[in-house]
Image (cartoon, rainbow, N blue to C red):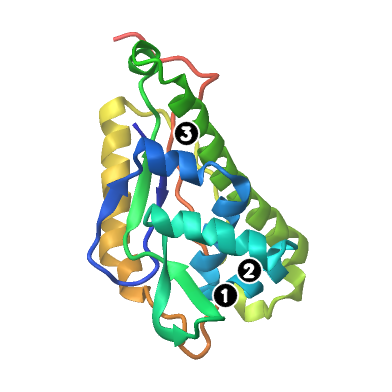
Amino acid sequence: MPTNHEPEQAPEPRTQRPVGPDALKALSHPLRIQILDLLGHHSALTASGLAELLGESSGATSYHLRQLERHGFVQEVPGRGTARERWWERAPGGFTIELPDDEAAAGDGNQGAVVATLAVNREFEAMRQRKIMDFLDNARTLDRAWLDSGATLATINMWLTKEQLAEVQAEWQRFSDTVLDRFAGQQDTPGARPVQVHFNAFPLINGKENPS
Protein backbone atom coordinates (compact mmCIF):
# COMPACT_ATOMS: atom_id res chain seq x y z
CA MET A 1 0.00 0.00 0.00
CA PRO A 2 1.73 3.24 -1.07
CA THR A 3 1.67 5.70 1.81
CA ASN A 4 3.86 8.53 0.60
CA HIS A 5 4.86 9.70 -2.84
CA GLU A 6 7.57 12.29 -3.30
CA PRO A 7 7.62 13.44 -6.93
CA GLU A 8 10.60 14.37 -9.01
CA GLN A 9 11.40 18.05 -9.38
CA ALA A 10 12.57 18.19 -13.01
CA PRO A 11 11.10 16.61 -16.16
CA GLU A 12 13.19 13.44 -15.96
CA PRO A 13 11.85 10.02 -17.01
CA ARG A 14 9.07 9.15 -14.57
CA THR A 15 10.43 6.58 -12.17
CA GLN A 16 9.02 6.00 -8.71
CA ARG A 17 11.48 3.80 -6.91
CA PRO A 18 10.38 2.07 -3.71
CA VAL A 19 12.50 2.97 -0.70
CA GLY A 20 14.20 -0.15 0.65
CA PRO A 21 14.94 -0.90 4.31
CA ASP A 22 18.45 0.60 4.36
CA ALA A 23 17.40 3.77 2.56
CA LEU A 24 14.33 4.05 4.80
CA LYS A 25 16.51 3.83 7.88
CA ALA A 26 18.76 6.56 6.47
CA LEU A 27 15.74 8.76 5.75
CA SER A 28 14.12 8.33 9.16
CA HIS A 29 15.67 11.46 10.64
CA PRO A 30 13.56 14.65 10.76
CA LEU A 31 16.45 16.88 9.67
CA ARG A 32 17.11 14.77 6.56
CA ILE A 33 13.46 14.94 5.58
CA GLN A 34 13.56 18.72 6.06
CA ILE A 35 16.67 18.91 3.86
CA LEU A 36 14.89 16.97 1.11
CA ASP A 37 11.88 19.25 1.42
CA LEU A 38 13.97 22.43 1.17
CA LEU A 39 15.85 21.12 -1.85
CA GLY A 40 12.48 20.34 -3.42
CA HIS A 41 11.31 23.95 -3.47
CA HIS A 42 14.62 25.83 -3.41
CA SER A 43 15.99 23.80 -6.31
CA ALA A 44 19.60 23.70 -5.14
CA LEU A 45 21.37 24.75 -1.97
CA THR A 46 24.75 24.46 -0.30
CA ALA A 47 25.29 22.91 3.12
CA SER A 48 25.77 26.44 4.46
CA GLY A 49 22.54 27.63 2.87
CA LEU A 50 20.66 24.70 4.35
CA ALA A 51 22.23 25.32 7.74
CA GLU A 52 21.04 28.93 7.71
CA LEU A 53 17.48 27.95 6.80
CA LEU A 54 17.34 25.14 9.35
CA GLY A 55 19.17 26.83 12.21
CA GLU A 56 21.81 24.10 12.21
CA SER A 57 25.57 24.02 11.75
CA SER A 58 26.98 23.49 8.26
CA GLY A 59 28.84 20.49 9.65
CA ALA A 60 25.52 18.86 10.58
CA THR A 61 23.90 19.57 7.22
CA SER A 62 27.01 18.35 5.38
CA TYR A 63 26.88 15.07 7.29
CA HIS A 64 23.18 14.53 6.57
CA LEU A 65 23.67 15.43 2.90
CA ARG A 66 26.34 12.76 2.58
CA GLN A 67 24.01 10.19 4.10
CA LEU A 68 21.21 11.19 1.74
CA GLU A 69 23.61 11.04 -1.21
CA ARG A 70 24.76 7.57 -0.19
CA HIS A 71 21.20 6.29 -0.53
CA GLY A 72 20.39 8.13 -3.75
CA PHE A 73 18.13 10.90 -2.43
CA VAL A 74 20.37 13.86 -3.34
CA GLN A 75 23.25 14.58 -5.69
CA GLU A 76 25.75 17.33 -6.38
CA VAL A 77 24.69 19.84 -9.00
CA PRO A 78 26.80 19.04 -12.08
CA GLY A 79 29.26 21.80 -13.00
CA ARG A 80 28.40 24.05 -10.08
CA GLY A 81 30.32 24.85 -6.94
CA THR A 82 33.86 24.27 -5.78
CA ALA A 83 35.67 21.77 -3.61
CA ARG A 84 34.86 23.99 -0.62
CA GLU A 85 31.30 24.98 -1.59
CA ARG A 86 29.29 22.13 -3.04
CA TRP A 87 25.77 22.64 -4.37
CA TRP A 88 23.17 19.94 -3.80
CA GLU A 89 19.86 19.05 -5.42
CA ARG A 90 17.34 16.25 -5.17
CA ALA A 91 18.17 13.25 -7.31
CA PRO A 92 16.04 12.88 -10.47
CA GLY A 93 12.96 10.70 -10.15
CA GLY A 94 10.54 10.31 -7.27
CA PHE A 95 10.24 7.65 -4.62
CA THR A 96 7.46 5.76 -2.89
CA ILE A 97 7.36 4.68 0.74
CA GLU A 98 5.08 1.72 1.33
CA LEU A 99 3.70 0.59 4.65
CA PRO A 100 4.94 -2.96 5.37
CA ASP A 101 2.32 -5.60 5.99
CA ASP A 102 2.05 -5.93 9.79
CA GLU A 103 1.89 -9.74 9.77
CA ALA A 104 4.79 -10.08 7.35
CA ALA A 105 6.87 -7.61 9.33
CA ALA A 106 6.11 -9.42 12.57
CA GLY A 107 7.04 -12.74 10.97
CA ASP A 108 10.35 -11.35 9.73
CA GLY A 109 11.07 -9.73 13.07
CA ASN A 110 11.09 -6.42 11.23
CA GLN A 111 8.72 -4.26 13.23
CA GLY A 112 11.40 -1.59 13.05
CA ALA A 113 10.55 -1.11 9.37
CA VAL A 114 6.93 -0.40 10.31
CA VAL A 115 7.98 2.14 12.94
CA ALA A 116 10.43 3.84 10.56
CA THR A 117 7.85 3.98 7.76
CA LEU A 118 5.26 5.58 10.02
CA ALA A 119 7.81 8.09 11.36
CA VAL A 120 8.93 9.15 7.87
CA ASN A 121 5.38 9.48 6.54
CA ARG A 122 4.27 11.45 9.58
CA GLU A 123 7.16 13.88 9.14
CA PHE A 124 6.37 14.42 5.46
CA GLU A 125 2.72 15.02 6.31
CA ALA A 126 3.64 17.35 9.19
CA MET A 127 5.68 19.46 6.79
CA ARG A 128 2.74 19.68 4.38
CA GLN A 129 0.47 20.78 7.21
CA ARG A 130 2.99 23.40 8.35
CA LYS A 131 3.03 24.85 4.84
CA ILE A 132 -0.77 25.04 4.77
CA MET A 133 -0.88 26.80 8.14
CA ASP A 134 1.88 29.19 7.03
CA PHE A 135 -0.18 29.98 3.93
CA LEU A 136 -3.33 30.61 5.99
CA ASP A 137 -1.46 32.81 8.46
CA ASN A 138 0.41 34.84 5.84
CA ALA A 139 -1.72 34.79 2.67
CA ARG A 140 -2.44 38.50 3.12
CA THR A 141 1.24 39.25 2.48
CA LEU A 142 1.04 37.82 -1.05
CA ASP A 143 0.19 39.71 -4.20
CA ARG A 144 -3.58 39.38 -4.52
CA ALA A 145 -3.17 38.02 -8.03
CA TRP A 146 -1.66 34.84 -6.57
CA LEU A 147 -4.77 34.29 -4.45
CA ASP A 148 -7.14 35.02 -7.33
CA SER A 149 -5.24 32.78 -9.74
CA GLY A 150 -6.52 29.53 -8.27
CA ALA A 151 -4.94 29.05 -4.84
CA THR A 152 -7.38 26.80 -3.03
CA LEU A 153 -7.79 24.41 -0.11
CA ALA A 154 -10.61 21.93 -0.63
CA THR A 155 -11.97 18.83 1.10
CA ILE A 156 -14.40 16.48 -0.64
CA ASN A 157 -16.23 13.85 1.41
CA MET A 158 -17.49 10.83 -0.53
CA TRP A 159 -18.55 7.21 -0.22
CA LEU A 160 -16.54 4.98 -2.56
CA THR A 161 -15.82 1.33 -3.10
CA LYS A 162 -12.23 0.09 -3.14
CA GLU A 163 -12.41 -0.12 -6.93
CA GLN A 164 -13.71 3.44 -7.25
CA LEU A 165 -10.99 4.76 -4.95
CA ALA A 166 -8.42 3.05 -7.18
CA GLU A 167 -10.03 4.72 -10.21
CA VAL A 168 -9.82 8.16 -8.57
CA GLN A 169 -6.13 7.59 -7.80
CA ALA A 170 -5.46 6.45 -11.37
CA GLU A 171 -7.13 9.59 -12.75
CA TRP A 172 -5.02 11.76 -10.48
CA GLN A 173 -1.88 10.03 -11.74
CA ARG A 174 -3.01 10.60 -15.32
CA PHE A 175 -3.58 14.30 -14.55
CA SER A 176 -0.14 14.53 -12.96
CA ASP A 177 1.46 12.86 -16.00
CA THR A 178 -0.31 14.99 -18.60
CA VAL A 179 -0.70 18.39 -16.91
CA LEU A 180 1.63 18.88 -13.98
CA ASP A 181 4.65 17.39 -15.76
CA ARG A 182 4.38 20.13 -18.41
CA PHE A 183 5.27 22.71 -15.77
CA ALA A 184 8.18 20.85 -14.15
CA GLY A 185 11.68 22.32 -14.15
CA GLN A 186 10.67 26.00 -14.10
CA GLN A 187 13.03 27.11 -11.33
CA ASP A 188 14.44 29.90 -13.51
CA THR A 189 11.22 30.93 -15.25
CA PRO A 190 10.44 34.67 -14.80
CA GLY A 191 7.39 35.21 -12.60
CA ALA A 192 7.42 31.66 -11.20
CA ARG A 193 7.53 30.91 -7.50
CA PRO A 194 7.45 27.63 -5.51
CA VAL A 195 3.96 26.10 -5.42
CA GLN A 196 2.78 22.86 -3.82
CA VAL A 197 -0.09 20.74 -5.11
CA HIS A 198 -1.46 18.23 -2.60
CA PHE A 199 -3.67 15.24 -3.31
CA ASN A 200 -4.91 12.91 -0.58
CA ALA A 201 -7.42 10.11 -1.04
CA PHE A 202 -7.84 7.64 1.79
CA PRO A 203 -10.51 5.72 3.73
CA LEU A 204 -11.55 7.38 6.98
CA ILE A 205 -10.54 5.24 9.93
CA ASN A 206 -13.64 6.16 11.95
CA GLY A 207 -15.97 5.02 9.15
CA LYS A 208 -17.40 1.60 8.42
CA GLU A 209 -17.64 -0.34 5.17
CA ASN A 210 -21.21 -1.04 4.06
CA PRO A 211 -22.06 -4.76 3.93
CA SER A 212 -22.05 -6.35 0.47
> Mark 1 packing: few (<14 Cα in 10 Å), some, or many (20+)?
many
The reply to whether residue 18 is visible in this rendering is yes
Residue that extends furthest to the left in the rendered view of this protein: 13
Q: Residue at x 53, y 87 (%)?
A: 191
Q: Amino acid at mark 3?
A: Thr
- Name the element at disc 1: strand
Residue on which the image places disc 2: 50
| Residue identified by numbered label 3 | 117
Q: Measured along the vertical axis of the image, is residue 67 above or below residue 125?
A: below
Relative to 114, 152 lies left or right: right
Disc 2 to disc 1, how far (Cα)?
Answer: 6 Å
Q: Position of residue 121 (x, y in %)?
A: 51, 39
Residue 122 in percent (x, y) is at 57, 38
State whether residue 148 is above or below residue 64: below
Q: Give the Cα distance between marks 3 and 2.
A: 25 Å
Q: Nearer the viewer, residue 208 or 31?
A: 31
- Which of 37/105 is in front? 105
Question: Contact (CB < 8 A) between labels 2 and 1?
Answer: yes
Q: Which mark is residue 185?
A: none
> Which residue type carries mark 2?
Leu
Numbered disc 3: secondary structure: helix
Give me the residue at 27% from left, 69% from top: 12
- Crowdedness near tag 2: few (<14), some (14–19) or many (≥20) residues, C-alpha within 10 Å: many
Q: Residues within 10 Å of mark 3 (few under 14, many from 20)?
A: many
Label annotation for residue 46: 1
Residue 198: x, y in percent? 49, 53
> Foreground: 112 or 171?
112
